[in-house]
Amino acid sequence: MFSGYSTMKYTEYKNPDKFLAVCRPVFMEKEPLYGLMLGITLRLIKHTHYYGGQPLLATIESETGLDLIALMTPPYKLQVASPNDYSLEAIRLLASSLHENGWHVPAVMGERKVVKAFEANWNEIAGTRSHTGMRQRLYELRTVLPIKIPGGSLRKAQIDDLELSRRWGKSFYRDCFGDSEPVANIDNLVKNTIEEGNLFFWVNPEPVSMAALTRPTIHGVSISYVYTPPHLRGNGYASAVVACLSRHALESGKKFCTLFTDLSNPTSNSIYQKIGYDPVADIMEIQFTDAKSSAL
């Protein structure tokens, strides 16, 4: 317990298993919505330092149950979810506890009302400045709709494809996040994804587009790293690799697939809906900068 928050308890977990034990009922109730947090947690259970440093796994509980869930894998952004009714008191306790425990928060993502409340409290407590980052939409697919497929086929990436995969992986991050998302760990993430058998190409006959299965949950899996080089775009390759990879995931036993899109890109949002992806929630990102450095 913390002074001033007599009915709320902030807890940080060093053990991902214990964190999941507390959060699992919430995660499973809305598995597609909380799939990002659940998938990362399951990955951390297998390898605590999969993303590099010590992850932040935290909850805020009150007499009414679980009020907030927070997860961060430095140097990546903080994720915040509010399973129950939105609570300003819980948000302020989270911000003050993170600051008191010395956590650096480069950005925060989640549903708008929670993220905006955290932004105000973090700026006040940590002395940062902030600006709005990417606005994303989370989609869910349970049935792949028929679409026109261009020439070519789906092929699983092999270790011989590592150099190309790393290059395209970095280009994917730069296209999606600009300079706001660290790319230093991409080489290892891409290599791990290939070794896990989860990176795929659309080949015609050489690779023309890429996508990956990532962060599997109990019943679902996410599709990410969707990338087509600029000179090959407009040929339907991204639609093909996502549609066929989604079908592959469902045929392999998953009940649903999820993916995130950039709301500023109407083309990708339209393409994925034609494949069968339905909107689940809109996700907002706020990026933070140190007030002193931003004033220089």
Image (cartoon, helix red, strand yellow):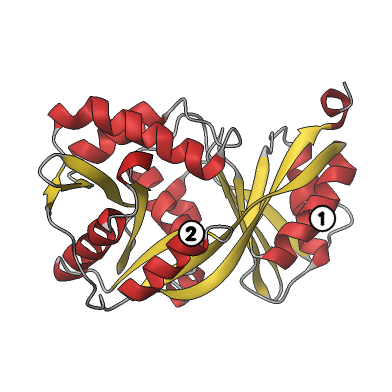
Residue 78, can we see it? yes
Vertically, is 282 above or below 235?
below
Alpha carbon separation for disc pair 1 and 2:
29 Å
How many neighbours does mark 2 have within 10 angstroms: few (below 14), some (14-19), or many (20 or more)? Answer: many
Q: Percent position (x, y) of residue 170?
A: 41, 32
Q: Which mark is residue 92?
A: 1
- The quarter of the rendered structure image containing the C terminus is top right
Vertically, is 51 above or below 89?
above
Q: Which residue is mark 2?
A: 261
Going from N to C along the chain, the mark reached first, 1 or 2, is 1
Q: Quadrant of residue 146?
A: bottom left
Query: Residue at the location (49% across, 66% down)?
Result: 138
The kind of residue tagged 2 is: Thr
Label 2 near label 1: C-beta < 8 Å? no
Query: Residue at the location (17% across, 63% down)?
Result: 248
Q: Is residue 275 left or right of residue 185?
A: left
Residue 2, can we see it? no
Looking at the picture, tell me which residue is in the foreground, 39 or 25. 39
Q: Is residue 288 left or right of residue 135?
A: right
Looking at the rendered structure, the secondary structure element under dot 1 is helix
